[in-house]
Amino acid sequence: MSAVAGRLRAVPHAQKLLATAAILVAVLVPFYFGKGSPQIDDATLAMAYIGMALGLNLIVGFAGLLDLGYVAFFAIGAFTMGWLGSGFFSQAGGEGVHVLVSEPASNLPGIHMNFLVVIVFAIIFTTIAGMLIGLPTLRLRGDYIAIVTLAFGEIIGRVAINGDELRIGGIWDATIAKLPFFEPIGSAATLTGGRRGITPVDKVDLPFVERFVALDLRPWYFLALAIVLIALFVNFRLRDSRLGRAWIALREDEVAAASMGVPLVKTKLLAYGTGAAFGGASGAFLASYLNTVNADQFQFSFSIFILGMVILGGLGSIWGVVVGAIALSLLNNYFIPDVFNTWPEKVGLDFDLSQLSFGIFGFLLVIMMVLRPEGLIPERRRQLELEEGIGAGATAGAGPTLEGGTGKHGEDVYETRRD
Amino acid sequence: MEAATTTAAKPAAPAPVAVARDFLAKYGLIIFLLAMPIAFGIRDLSAEGDLSRLGNNLVDGVSNGAIWALVALGYTLVYGIIELINFAHGDVFMLGSFVSVGLWGTFALTVATGALGLVVGLVVTLFVAMIATGALNVMIERVAYRPLRNAPKLAPLITAVGFSFILQNVGLLWLGGSPEGVTDLIESQDRFFEVGGVVITNGDALAFTATIPLVLGLTTFIARSRIGKAMRATAQDPEAARLMGINVDTTISFTFLLGGLMAGAAGLIYALYQTTVWYFQGFQAGLIAFTAAVMGGIGNLRGAVLGGLIIGCIQQMSDNRIGGQWTNAVVFGYLVIIMVFRPQGLLGEETREAG
């Protein structure tokens, strides 16, 4: 695999060709399957996960800030969709609040905004949340960041589950609804739907396009593909930008980066903010696609599911993350329930394999880290780093050999970075 | 405190702001931790005129916290020696519970077995469970952490999370997905004795009597024994320890063994105390115990015990006063606040990590 990847890199245009081919295939795939076929469903979910994995890759892969609470951003994005695009606040503004929506949403009570408006709000909310979560971790490093983000993820999960006890209606009507442009939402309104969830959520309603329906999955697929392509474009641009290089410097050596004039606070907060924004956008899309915002979706295991995609593909490697996301989501949504699930029966065992999907992920994570820590399609810089570490480890034994990073490969890395 | 005294000794009086800042940095977290019991105590006094409710909460909290302390010791030992958050540790604890429950079944232990039979049975169970989890922990270290000793710190953390999922699914296959009630061998909710309205149940008594010797034994072992000395040396500087003739790999394995032993004991006590076990208990307990270890100062054994007891009390008060469904959010809120204001914990030293 790595040999193939290496040879591809040696040919300058091979990667571009491969990418174009991949996008072409992605555009043509839905026409091969039926309109509502489970394959398109799986592929759409995979796309949404790619969006999230690309966002997490910014935080973990580029900036080196291990985030174990990424599900929080999925939750915030999804809840934004639930709040602004469903009948959840059924008392809001009497007849309901409607922004740029067509039939039938425009006749229903509750807050109904166009998907494009909601996604903007989702991005704003998650960016703010990302920065807020980033704030306490500014002084911390490594494992401690992992723990704080995990704690935030768990807190938001708890709030999602118990949010039906949090009545925001009274406070909202007493304070915010008095301002111009704000509508009262009724004193009974709660923050989340708790375990019952918020359902139904408005279908996507784009200008110049027919309203999305649950039976025809192709428009959903193309929307998800569009989100992925935008995310990919932004990721590549960000990687090569000043900010992206600052992130990579931060990942390699925080002290050195700071002393070379990288503003740590701003760089870290922007990493959390931008990474979170992708999670929020994908979360809003998923809420609309799955037609529900349910507190049980926002578990710690989902954070690891997304992190697994990033690691499987190769930390920091954009194409790697795409491959990892496709692999893991297909494993979760297709291979485990539909293909492997008959295996235990064949061997004479009696258990439901789909129950154990996270055990399989765990196994994959361990195997991957022990045998191929650089991932399926490693980022060149990181691969060098790991090779160097293994070499140094063999001669010098235990010790923090990898704190530094580039070392003797420094120039080499610089030369080959823009491949 | 040192800073305050040295500046006070100088002729120029220290600025009051600086004094206040030093004071807050040193005692702020302790004041913050005491705020909740004091607030509830005042409310108890003003409403009912006695503190028995707070007292009961604290007793339950401490006995619950004793179990977290045992689990937290495993985190702190491992973190102290290789600076790894062993995410799988909570699930090792869970499997300790499962092994214990399985053994009661094999020995056919019930309340009717009689006191002597019960004691013998439980002691045997304790040993088997401890050895099983200790061996499991050593195995995990071999398979998932040792090959990554020289990799970036991210790598073993991820294998730890991976192993946590694997063990959870082992538990899921073993006893199914829902909490399973187990025989209440010691009638844990029955009154053991009562002082001034504060009830100490059998379960509380068991938690104290089983935990105190284990903790004392472990701390003495690490302070006195040869291998304990080797562990401390390795924790300080693995390279120098190796040069001094210490087998670092064996020492690390031994640390994992000790952590596993404590987790197994905690698993048995948990099963006796809570009378339910389920596959997800380990993950929850792991996060709580980890919070405890961080609160006490990770790498510090006494800190882990102290943190465990404090977290136990916080949980109990939150269960009874705020609502059990919010307890985890409260615990993690505390974790975030500790991380922000005092990442080195209550008893911990300022380290490079805490920066």
Image: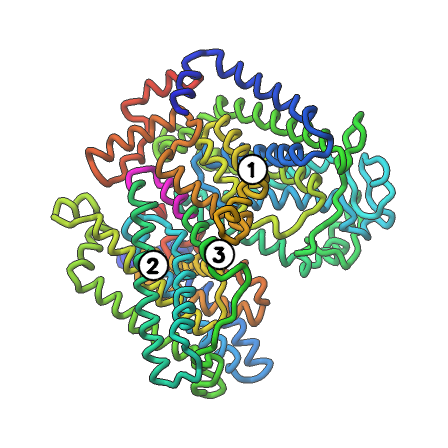
Task: Measuring from the top left, give residue B146's x and y in whole percent.
Answer: 29, 44
Q: Decide which of B51, B149 is in the foreground and name it.
A: B149
Residue assigned mark 2: B74
B176 left or right of A144 in image? right
Task: Measuring from the top left, give residue A167's x and y in whole percent.
Answer: 71, 59
Q: Nearer the viewer, mark 1 or mark 3?
A: 3
- Disc 1 to disc 3, how far (Cα)? 23 Å
Q: Chain of mark 3?
A: B
Q: Which residues are magenta?
A: B149-161
Q: Does residue B180 appear anywhere in the picture?
A: yes
Label disc, if present, on residue A329 of the rendered structure? 1
B340 left or right of B78 in image? right
A202 left or right of A154 in image? right
Q: Quadrant of residue A181?
A: top right
The quarter of the rendered structure image containing the C terminus of chain A is top left
Amino acid at the residue labelled 2:
Gly
State if disc 3 and disc 1 touch (CB < 8 Å): no
Image vertical order of residue A384 relative to residue B253, above or below: above
Query: What residue is at 41 percent from the left and 51 percent from the top?
Result: B87
Label disc, if present, on residue B173 of the rendered structure? 3
Secondary structure character of the magenta stretch overall: helix
A134 left or right of B244 in image? right
Residue A385 falls inside the magenta stretch = no
Residue B151 falls inside the magenta stretch = yes
Q: Nearer the viewer, mark 1 or mark 2?
A: 1
Image vertical order of residue B224 relative to residue A331, above or below: below
